[in-house]
Image (cartoon, rainbow, N blue to C red):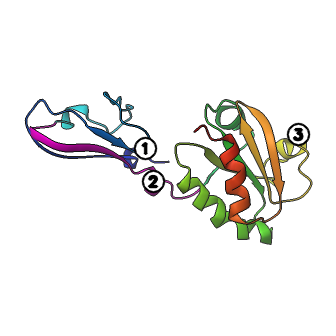
Amino acid sequence: MALENCFQLSSVCTTRAAVVQSYHCRFSSVEKIHLPTFPGLNKHNLSFNGRCQKSRLICKAREAVDQVEGVTEANWRELVVGSETPVLVEFWAPWCGPCRMIEPVIAELAKEYAGKIACYKLNTDESPNIATEFGIRSIPTMLFFKNGEKKESIIGAVPKSTLAASIEKYVDS
């Protein structure tokens, strides 16, 4: 996900001592906001000038998720096992028709739950050892992980509501 596209500051201010008054992204109001650092973020460009009528930080993460990233045996431990957020992994293959059917559903869920869960897809043809380790016998299979542990599996091209209900179990409120 392109973190550069994730945050947008918007402000209507007329004093230099402006304070961010609200933080909108399904979070409660906070007094201080700590922005992550990443290449391309110039904190000196983030200034508030003038008297503040309303300032807000808007999460643009939903627009930043263009597609579900792939995970491989090489980065499995880092992205899935080592994740601090819950993870949804879709086990798929390019020749699988039902996998192609559920792919846009997974992408929609990745956008809707951006920042709350991480979504990845694992090509079982390219990474058969992980599929074998978790007993994947048919695809598509979606596995849910929290704190590095497998919590649940869903087999087949199921409706979006079924996946959303499972995600809700593992997302911290």
Query: Which residue is pictured at 12% across the width and 29% down the height?
Result: 17
Label whose residue precedes the other's in the sequence (1 or 2):
1
In the image, residue 78 lies at what x, y percent? 66, 32
| Residue holding disc 3 | 133
Q: CA distance from mark 2 to mark 3?
A: 32 Å
Please tell me the numbered disc located at residue 85.
none
Q: Is residue 156 left or right of residue 51?
A: right
Q: Where 82 sits versus 166, above or below?
A: above
Query: Which residue is pictured at 69% across the width and 47% down the height?
Result: 88
| Secondary structure beneath label 2 | helix
| Secondary structure beneath label 3 | helix
| Secondary structure beneath label 1 | helix
- Name the amino acid type tagged 3: Glu
Q: Is residue 1 left or right of residue 76?
A: left
Marks 2, 3: nearer the viewer:
2
In the image, residue 85 lies at what x, y percent? 61, 36
Q: Is residue 116 left or right of residue 27?
A: right
In the image, residue 38 lies at what x, y percent? 39, 34
Does the magenta segment cover residue 50?
Answer: yes
Residues tagged 1 and 2 counted as in contact (Cβ below 8 A) = yes
Residues tagged 1 and 3 counted as in contact (Cβ below 8 A) = no
Query: Which residue is pictured at 73% across the width and 31% down the height?
Result: 148
Question: What's drawn in magenta, residue-wise?
Answer: 48-67
Does the magenta segment cover residue 76?
Answer: no
Label whose residue precedes the other's in the sequence (1 or 3):
1
- Name the amino acid type tagged 2: Ala
| Residue holding disc 1 | 3
- Name the amino acid type tagged 1: Leu
Which of the image's four quarters has the C terminus? Answer: top right
